[in-house]
Amino acid sequence: MTVTDDLVSYEDALASYDPVMGLEVHVELGTATKMFCGCATTLGAEPNSQTCPTCLGLPGALPVVNAVGVESAIRIGLALNCEIAEWCRFARKNYFYPDMPKNFQTSQYDEPIAFNGYLDVQLDDGTIFRVEIERAHMEEDTGKSTHIGGATGRIHGASHSLLDYNRAGIPLIEIVTKPITGAGERAPEVAKAYVAELRELIKALGVSEARMEMGQMRCDVNVSLRPHGREKFGTRSETKNVNSLRSVERAVRFEIQRHAAVLDGGGAIVQETRHFHEENGSTTSGRVKEEAEDYRYFPEPDLVPVAPPKEWVEELRGELPELPRARRNRLREEWGISEHEMQSVLNAGAIDLITATIEAGADQAAARKWWMGELARRANEAGAELAALPVTPAQIARVAALVAEGSLNDKLARQVIEGVLAGEGSPDEVVEARGLKIVKDEGALGAAVDEAIAANPGVADKVRGGKVAAAGALVGAVMKATRGQADAGRARELILERLGVQG
């Protein structure tokens, strides 16, 4: 039996049930040191080389709060329209995990630093959906377990596990939504749009690179269903550590279909954590989900409460950068494009790339054309993000400049981009190495025109007879003979001159 045998259709699920979602997003802050000690947070360091008695939980080692982590948490809270606590404290969240060296996580429980906010997100058709924020709180990340010997990379079937505590103690902000209701059939789209907007906001604040593929931002997706007309929420499942926008959308859709199948069959949903599988978009059971009381929260005795002065909070509010929605609206007006076109740019992850290309000298139309056309196509073929392509905005600006000055046409420019992506050098180096410049030499171009006319006497006669549009076939022959490197406009002028026809 395949996984999909246990699902009902998405349409049938929505015909009987209302989906309710809760999204918990963990953001690794880009601080130089960990949340409660002075250990470095450099990515890719030797395993267990960035540890100390504090982040290893050794007896007698005392934590100290990272001030930049607190400031980043406040910035995030303000950007999410949250209230900022005048007084809050940390708590110990007790549970055993091999990658938790202290056997508890220092987090915040009933007294978060930011609470009661919202984030408006725009869906593909321009609809604005408000997602209400329950809280944003500070905590520390766990270490990393690598399971060896199994077929799946998970602990089941592994012969042994390796533990790296470099990540243990890295500052995290967990952003928790209130129950998201009213999305209906658009629930997967709302979830994806919310995480996408949150990622853009985090990047704009400069508190994290928020690269989901590197685990710097990850989402726990909670889904439950309730029959139409019922107020009480159903039992939820929590799909852990979903690390791409597409996967967030797929996880919500799959869980809606799975829940509906269980409920339609007379079964009961188990409150549990689940694992998401990228290869087919399915989820599988992890472990029974604990309730808050199972974690035996109690106030952290080794840390003083955090009480940010109102003056400081207002100072940080005044320093907030232009936030993503406001920036998109401004750019949309500057670029003279529709909301639908800007949404396409956003969905492609191209806003920053286009902006940087314009700053490097390209006009906005050319910048959008290359990133949303040729480069988007290549990224799609490679199954990669646009930003992951091995080409820079400055290089695309140079390609646009070569086209604007007449050294390249679009066909040749695509070949130049191909060469840059292949690692053949800068645009100018690729042009030189491949011999891609437009042929402007009048002698060479004239010879190609004469050959095209001689090889196509019938077409030439039509042009002489007044069918000027037929000259296009001769221009095509010239372009073919010159491997697309002729100046098409000048070639047409020469053809008409040779045939004695006014353009």
Image: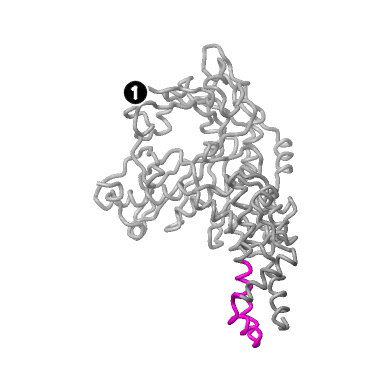
Could you say whether the residue bearing mark 1 is in a helix, strand or loop?
A: loop
**In the rendering, at what x and y percent does residue 380 appear?**
51, 53
Whether residue 370 sits left or right of residue 281 in the image: it is right
Q: 10 Å neighbourhood of mark 1: few (<14), some, or many (≥20)?
A: few
31 up-or-down from 360: above or below: above
The boundaries of the magenta stretch are 455-479
| Residue 391: in magenta span | no
Q: Amino acid at mark 1?
A: Ser
Residue 208, quarter of the rendered image: top right
Front-most of 323 and 425? 425
Asked if the magenta segment contains residue 466, the reply would be: yes
Whether 171 is drawn above or below 232: the answer is above
344, above or below 490, in the image = above
What residue is at 52 percent from the left and 25 percent from the top?
168
Asked if residue 10 lies left or right of residue 297, the reply is: left
> Where does the image place residue 265, in percent across and percent down from the top left?
24, 51
Of residue 263 and residue 455, the one placed in the foreground of this image is 455
Badge 1 is on which residue?
A: 159
